[in-house]
Amino acid sequence: MKTKQLKSFLLCLALIAGHCGFGAQIELKPDDKPAFDDPPAGFDKKRDGIPHGTLEMIEYDSKTVGTTRKMNVYTPPGYSKDKKYPVLYLLHGIGGDETEWQRFAHPDILLDNLIADGKAVPMIIVMPNGRAQKNDRAEGNVFAAAPAFAAFEQDLLKDVIPAIESRYSVQADREHRALAGLSMGGGQSLNFGLAHLDIFAWVGGFSSAPNTKPPAQLVPDPTAAARQLKLLWLSCGNKDGLIRISQGMHAYLKENNVPHVWHVDGNGHDATHWRNNLWLFSQRIFK
Protein backbone atom coordinates (compact mmCIF):
# COMPACT_ATOMS: atom_id res chain seq x y z
CA MET A 1 0.00 0.00 0.00
CA LYS A 2 1.41 3.42 -0.96
CA THR A 3 2.18 6.03 1.71
CA LYS A 4 -0.86 8.21 0.94
CA GLN A 5 -3.18 5.21 0.91
CA LEU A 6 -1.69 3.89 4.15
CA LYS A 7 -2.17 7.23 5.90
CA SER A 8 -5.79 7.37 4.75
CA PHE A 9 -6.39 3.83 5.96
CA LEU A 10 -4.75 4.43 9.35
CA LEU A 11 -6.71 7.65 9.78
CA CYS A 12 -9.93 5.77 9.14
CA LEU A 13 -9.03 3.14 11.74
CA ALA A 14 -7.95 5.74 14.28
CA LEU A 15 -11.19 7.66 13.91
CA ILE A 16 -13.28 4.54 14.21
CA ALA A 17 -11.27 3.42 17.23
CA GLY A 18 -11.73 6.73 19.01
CA HIS A 19 -15.34 7.48 18.19
CA CYS A 20 -17.16 4.19 17.54
CA GLY A 21 -15.88 1.82 20.21
CA PHE A 22 -13.49 0.01 17.92
CA GLY A 23 -11.49 -1.07 20.94
CA ALA A 24 -14.46 -2.72 22.62
CA GLN A 25 -14.02 -6.22 24.01
CA ILE A 26 -14.72 -8.91 21.45
CA GLU A 27 -16.93 -11.79 22.54
CA LEU A 28 -17.12 -14.48 19.88
CA LYS A 29 -20.16 -16.74 19.74
CA PRO A 30 -20.57 -20.28 18.32
CA ASP A 31 -21.89 -19.00 14.97
CA ASP A 32 -18.96 -16.61 14.50
CA LYS A 33 -16.94 -18.65 12.03
CA PRO A 34 -16.10 -18.62 8.33
CA ALA A 35 -18.82 -19.61 5.89
CA PHE A 36 -16.27 -19.81 3.06
CA ASP A 37 -12.55 -20.30 2.57
CA ASP A 38 -10.32 -17.30 1.99
CA PRO A 39 -9.60 -16.41 -1.64
CA PRO A 40 -6.64 -18.11 -3.32
CA ALA A 41 -3.29 -16.38 -3.59
CA GLY A 42 -3.12 -13.93 -6.46
CA PHE A 43 -6.88 -13.44 -6.75
CA ASP A 44 -6.39 -9.66 -6.65
CA LYS A 45 -3.47 -9.47 -9.10
CA LYS A 46 -3.91 -8.20 -12.63
CA ARG A 47 -3.62 -11.05 -15.12
CA ASP A 48 -2.31 -10.88 -18.64
CA GLY A 49 -4.04 -12.81 -21.38
CA ILE A 50 -7.61 -12.16 -20.24
CA PRO A 51 -10.06 -9.43 -21.30
CA HIS A 52 -10.13 -6.34 -19.10
CA GLY A 53 -12.95 -3.98 -18.25
CA THR A 54 -12.84 -0.20 -18.02
CA LEU A 55 -12.71 2.06 -14.99
CA GLU A 56 -13.78 5.66 -15.43
CA MET A 57 -14.54 8.62 -13.19
CA ILE A 58 -17.78 10.31 -14.21
CA GLU A 59 -19.74 13.32 -12.99
CA TYR A 60 -23.45 13.65 -12.32
CA ASP A 61 -25.79 16.42 -11.23
CA SER A 62 -27.05 15.84 -7.70
CA LYS A 63 -30.30 17.64 -7.03
CA THR A 64 -30.18 16.26 -3.50
CA VAL A 65 -26.88 17.99 -2.72
CA GLY A 66 -27.22 20.84 -5.19
CA THR A 67 -23.90 20.33 -6.91
CA THR A 68 -22.02 18.20 -9.43
CA ARG A 69 -20.56 15.08 -7.85
CA LYS A 70 -18.24 12.25 -8.91
CA MET A 71 -18.41 8.47 -8.96
CA ASN A 72 -16.08 5.75 -10.15
CA VAL A 73 -17.65 3.26 -12.58
CA TYR A 74 -16.39 -0.14 -13.72
CA THR A 75 -17.79 -1.64 -16.91
CA PRO A 76 -16.96 -5.28 -17.61
CA PRO A 77 -14.86 -6.66 -20.49
CA GLY A 78 -16.73 -6.44 -23.77
CA TYR A 79 -19.25 -3.93 -22.44
CA SER A 80 -21.75 -3.22 -25.19
CA LYS A 81 -24.86 -1.06 -25.52
CA ASP A 82 -26.41 -4.08 -27.22
CA LYS A 83 -26.53 -5.92 -23.88
CA LYS A 84 -28.02 -4.99 -20.52
CA TYR A 85 -26.04 -5.45 -17.33
CA PRO A 86 -26.80 -5.76 -13.61
CA VAL A 87 -25.33 -3.12 -11.31
CA LEU A 88 -23.56 -3.36 -7.95
CA TYR A 89 -23.54 -0.07 -6.02
CA LEU A 90 -20.49 -0.25 -3.76
CA LEU A 91 -20.11 2.15 -0.82
CA HIS A 92 -16.99 3.30 1.07
CA GLY A 93 -16.14 3.94 4.73
CA ILE A 94 -16.22 7.11 6.80
CA GLY A 95 -12.63 8.06 5.93
CA GLY A 96 -13.01 7.39 2.21
CA ASP A 97 -14.58 8.69 -0.95
CA GLU A 98 -15.38 7.49 -4.47
CA THR A 99 -11.77 6.27 -4.84
CA GLU A 100 -11.52 4.23 -1.63
CA TRP A 101 -12.54 0.84 -3.00
CA GLN A 102 -10.08 1.26 -5.83
CA ARG A 103 -7.28 1.96 -3.33
CA PHE A 104 -8.11 -0.96 -1.05
CA ALA A 105 -9.41 -3.67 -3.33
CA HIS A 106 -9.20 -2.91 -7.09
CA PRO A 107 -12.72 -4.12 -7.88
CA ASP A 108 -11.90 -3.91 -11.59
CA ILE A 109 -9.11 -6.48 -11.23
CA LEU A 110 -11.20 -8.76 -8.99
CA LEU A 111 -14.09 -8.76 -11.43
CA ASP A 112 -11.93 -9.11 -14.54
CA ASN A 113 -10.41 -12.25 -13.00
CA LEU A 114 -13.72 -13.68 -11.78
CA ILE A 115 -15.47 -13.05 -15.09
CA ALA A 116 -12.60 -14.63 -17.00
CA ASP A 117 -12.91 -17.73 -14.78
CA GLY A 118 -16.69 -17.88 -15.26
CA LYS A 119 -17.27 -17.26 -11.54
CA ALA A 120 -19.05 -13.91 -11.74
CA VAL A 121 -21.74 -12.45 -13.95
CA PRO A 122 -20.49 -9.51 -16.07
CA MET A 123 -21.71 -6.50 -14.13
CA ILE A 124 -21.27 -2.77 -13.75
CA ILE A 125 -19.85 -1.58 -10.42
CA VAL A 126 -20.65 1.96 -9.27
CA MET A 127 -18.54 3.51 -6.52
CA PRO A 128 -20.13 6.84 -5.53
CA ASN A 129 -19.26 9.24 -2.72
CA GLY A 130 -21.50 8.39 0.22
CA ARG A 131 -20.96 11.77 1.90
CA ALA A 132 -23.90 13.76 0.51
CA GLN A 133 -22.78 17.33 1.12
CA LYS A 134 -21.24 20.02 -1.07
CA ASN A 135 -17.75 19.59 0.37
CA ASP A 136 -17.67 15.81 0.17
CA ARG A 137 -13.95 15.39 0.82
CA ALA A 138 -12.80 13.26 3.75
CA GLU A 139 -11.03 16.04 5.62
CA GLY A 140 -11.06 17.60 9.06
CA ASN A 141 -13.36 15.89 11.56
CA VAL A 142 -14.92 13.31 9.26
CA PHE A 143 -17.39 12.32 11.99
CA ALA A 144 -18.99 15.75 11.66
CA ALA A 145 -20.18 14.53 8.24
CA ALA A 146 -22.23 11.68 9.73
CA PRO A 147 -25.55 13.37 8.77
CA ALA A 148 -24.31 13.55 5.18
CA PHE A 149 -23.91 9.76 5.13
CA ALA A 150 -27.56 9.41 6.14
CA ALA A 151 -28.59 12.03 3.56
CA PHE A 152 -26.90 9.94 0.86
CA GLU A 153 -29.98 7.68 0.82
CA GLN A 154 -31.82 10.30 -1.24
CA ASP A 155 -28.82 11.07 -3.44
CA LEU A 156 -28.46 7.37 -4.20
CA LEU A 157 -32.12 6.81 -5.01
CA LYS A 158 -32.93 10.08 -6.77
CA ASP A 159 -29.64 11.04 -8.43
CA VAL A 160 -27.01 8.27 -8.58
CA ILE A 161 -29.22 5.43 -9.82
CA PRO A 162 -31.05 7.55 -12.43
CA ALA A 163 -27.71 8.92 -13.69
CA ILE A 164 -26.31 5.41 -14.12
CA GLU A 165 -29.45 4.07 -15.76
CA SER A 166 -29.55 6.96 -18.22
CA ARG A 167 -25.87 6.67 -19.15
CA TYR A 168 -25.23 2.92 -19.19
CA SER A 169 -27.02 -0.10 -20.60
CA VAL A 170 -28.43 -1.65 -17.44
CA GLN A 171 -31.19 -4.00 -16.34
CA ALA A 172 -33.23 -1.51 -14.35
CA ASP A 173 -35.13 -3.67 -11.87
CA ARG A 174 -34.60 -4.85 -8.31
CA GLU A 175 -33.39 -8.31 -9.28
CA HIS A 176 -30.49 -6.67 -11.11
CA ARG A 177 -29.47 -4.12 -8.46
CA ALA A 178 -27.15 -4.92 -5.55
CA LEU A 179 -25.99 -2.64 -2.74
CA ALA A 180 -22.96 -3.36 -0.55
CA GLY A 181 -20.34 -1.47 1.40
CA LEU A 182 -17.59 -1.48 4.00
CA SER A 183 -17.82 -0.10 7.56
CA MET A 184 -19.88 3.13 7.35
CA GLY A 185 -20.84 2.05 3.83
CA GLY A 186 -21.86 -1.33 5.19
CA GLY A 187 -24.24 0.39 7.57
CA GLN A 188 -25.56 2.51 4.73
CA SER A 189 -26.09 -0.59 2.60
CA LEU A 190 -28.12 -2.32 5.30
CA ASN A 191 -30.05 0.85 6.16
CA PHE A 192 -30.90 1.79 2.57
CA GLY A 193 -31.05 -1.64 0.97
CA LEU A 194 -33.32 -3.25 3.54
CA ALA A 195 -35.56 -0.18 3.58
CA HIS A 196 -35.97 -0.37 -0.19
CA LEU A 197 -36.35 -4.01 -1.15
CA ASP A 198 -38.46 -2.79 -4.04
CA ILE A 199 -35.21 -1.39 -5.46
CA PHE A 200 -32.49 -3.79 -4.25
CA ALA A 201 -32.70 -7.59 -4.07
CA TRP A 202 -29.05 -8.18 -3.09
CA VAL A 203 -27.60 -6.48 0.01
CA GLY A 204 -24.21 -6.80 1.70
CA GLY A 205 -22.65 -5.25 4.80
CA PHE A 206 -18.92 -5.83 5.34
CA SER A 207 -17.92 -5.03 8.97
CA SER A 208 -20.83 -2.62 9.23
CA ALA A 209 -20.32 0.39 11.50
CA PRO A 210 -22.51 1.76 14.34
CA ASN A 211 -24.49 3.87 11.88
CA THR A 212 -26.37 0.62 11.21
CA LYS A 213 -29.94 0.88 12.46
CA PRO A 214 -31.27 -1.64 15.05
CA PRO A 215 -32.16 -5.01 13.50
CA ALA A 216 -35.88 -4.80 14.29
CA GLN A 217 -36.01 -1.41 12.58
CA LEU A 218 -34.10 -2.70 9.56
CA VAL A 219 -36.27 -5.80 9.18
CA PRO A 220 -39.66 -5.03 10.76
CA ASP A 221 -41.38 -7.71 8.66
CA PRO A 222 -39.06 -10.76 8.55
CA THR A 223 -41.47 -12.79 6.42
CA ALA A 224 -41.59 -10.12 3.71
CA ALA A 225 -37.82 -9.65 3.82
CA ALA A 226 -37.23 -13.38 3.48
CA ARG A 227 -39.52 -13.44 0.46
CA GLN A 228 -37.97 -10.43 -1.29
CA LEU A 229 -34.26 -10.81 -0.64
CA LYS A 230 -32.18 -12.76 -3.13
CA LEU A 231 -29.13 -12.50 -0.86
CA LEU A 232 -28.38 -10.76 2.42
CA TRP A 233 -24.67 -10.90 3.27
CA LEU A 234 -23.21 -10.03 6.66
CA SER A 235 -19.51 -10.32 7.36
CA CYS A 236 -16.98 -9.24 9.94
CA GLY A 237 -13.51 -10.18 11.14
CA ASN A 238 -13.10 -11.94 14.47
CA LYS A 239 -10.53 -9.31 15.47
CA ASP A 240 -12.88 -6.40 14.67
CA GLY A 241 -14.00 -4.35 17.68
CA LEU A 242 -17.20 -3.50 15.81
CA ILE A 243 -18.28 -7.13 15.41
CA ARG A 244 -21.11 -6.65 17.92
CA ILE A 245 -23.02 -4.64 15.31
CA SER A 246 -23.08 -7.52 12.83
CA GLN A 247 -23.51 -10.14 15.56
CA GLY A 248 -26.71 -8.46 16.68
CA MET A 249 -28.03 -8.38 13.13
CA HIS A 250 -27.17 -12.03 12.56
CA ALA A 251 -28.86 -13.09 15.81
CA TYR A 252 -32.06 -11.23 14.91
CA LEU A 253 -32.17 -12.67 11.40
CA LYS A 254 -31.54 -16.19 12.65
CA GLU A 255 -34.22 -15.89 15.34
CA ASN A 256 -36.71 -14.64 12.75
CA ASN A 257 -35.83 -17.17 10.04
CA VAL A 258 -34.53 -14.68 7.49
CA PRO A 259 -32.03 -16.48 5.21
CA HIS A 260 -28.64 -14.78 5.09
CA VAL A 261 -24.91 -15.40 4.93
CA TRP A 262 -22.94 -14.84 8.15
CA HIS A 263 -19.23 -14.96 7.38
CA VAL A 264 -16.69 -14.30 10.13
CA ASP A 265 -13.08 -14.55 9.02
CA GLY A 266 -9.78 -14.06 10.85
CA ASN A 267 -9.27 -10.40 9.97
CA GLY A 268 -9.85 -7.09 11.72
CA HIS A 269 -11.51 -3.92 10.52
CA ASP A 270 -9.25 -3.82 7.53
CA ALA A 271 -8.78 -3.84 3.78
CA THR A 272 -8.11 -7.60 3.68
CA HIS A 273 -11.57 -8.33 5.05
CA TRP A 274 -13.25 -5.91 2.67
CA ARG A 275 -11.33 -7.14 -0.39
CA ASN A 276 -11.97 -10.80 0.43
CA ASN A 277 -15.68 -10.26 0.99
CA LEU A 278 -16.11 -8.28 -2.20
CA TRP A 279 -14.55 -11.27 -4.00
CA LEU A 280 -16.92 -13.69 -2.25
CA PHE A 281 -20.04 -11.53 -2.53
CA SER A 282 -19.63 -10.63 -6.20
CA GLN A 283 -19.59 -14.31 -7.18
CA ARG A 284 -22.99 -14.88 -5.60
CA ILE A 285 -25.06 -12.00 -6.90
CA PHE A 286 -27.22 -11.83 -10.02
CA LYS A 287 -27.43 -15.61 -10.25
Image (tube, grey):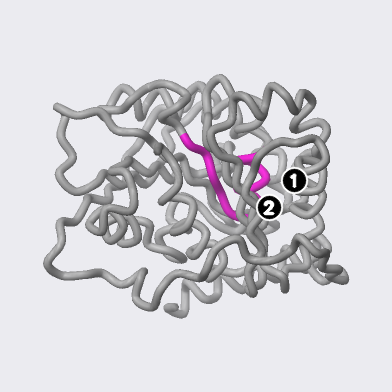
Residue located at (42% from left, 78% from top): 2
Q: Name the residue type under label 1.
A: Asn
Residue located at (67% from left, 45% from top): 187
Q: Pinpoint residue 250: horizontal percent, then vertical percent.
A: 75, 48
Residue located at (76% from left, 23% from top): 221
Q: Quadrant of the N terminus?
A: bottom left
Q: Quadrant of the C terminus?
A: top left
Residue 88 left/right relative to 55: right
Q: Look at the numbered discs 2 and 1 and tell me whether their residues touch, using CB distance below 8 Å.
A: yes
Residue 94 vs 260, above or below: the answer is below
Viewer-side residue, 107 vs 157? 107
In this view, the residue farthest toward the left is 49
Q: Residues within 10 Å of mark 2 (few under 14, many from 20)?
A: many
Viewer-side residue, 259 vs 109? 259
Q: Which residues are magenta?
A: 178-190
Q: Pinpoint residue 66: horizontal percent, then vertical percent.
A: 51, 26
Q: Of tags 2 and 1, which is closer to the observer?
A: 2
Task: Specify the quadrant of the image occupied by residue 61.
Answer: top left
| Residue position for label 2 | 208
Q: Residues within 10 Å of mark 1 (few under 14, many from 20)?
A: some
Identify the disc placed on residue 211.
1
Q: Name the residue type under label 2.
A: Ser
Residue 87 left/right relative to 131: left
Residue 175 vs 98, above or below: the answer is above
Task: Please tell me whether mark 1 sits on a helix, a strand or a loop.
Answer: loop
Residue located at (38% from left, 31% from top): 60
Q: Pinpoint residue 171: horizontal percent, then vertical percent.
A: 33, 25
Residue 37 left/right relative to 256: left
- Distance from label 2 to label 1 (Cα)? 8 Å
Task: Please tell me whether mark 2 sits on a helix, a strand or a loop.
Answer: loop
Q: Is residue 19 rendered magenta in the image?
A: no
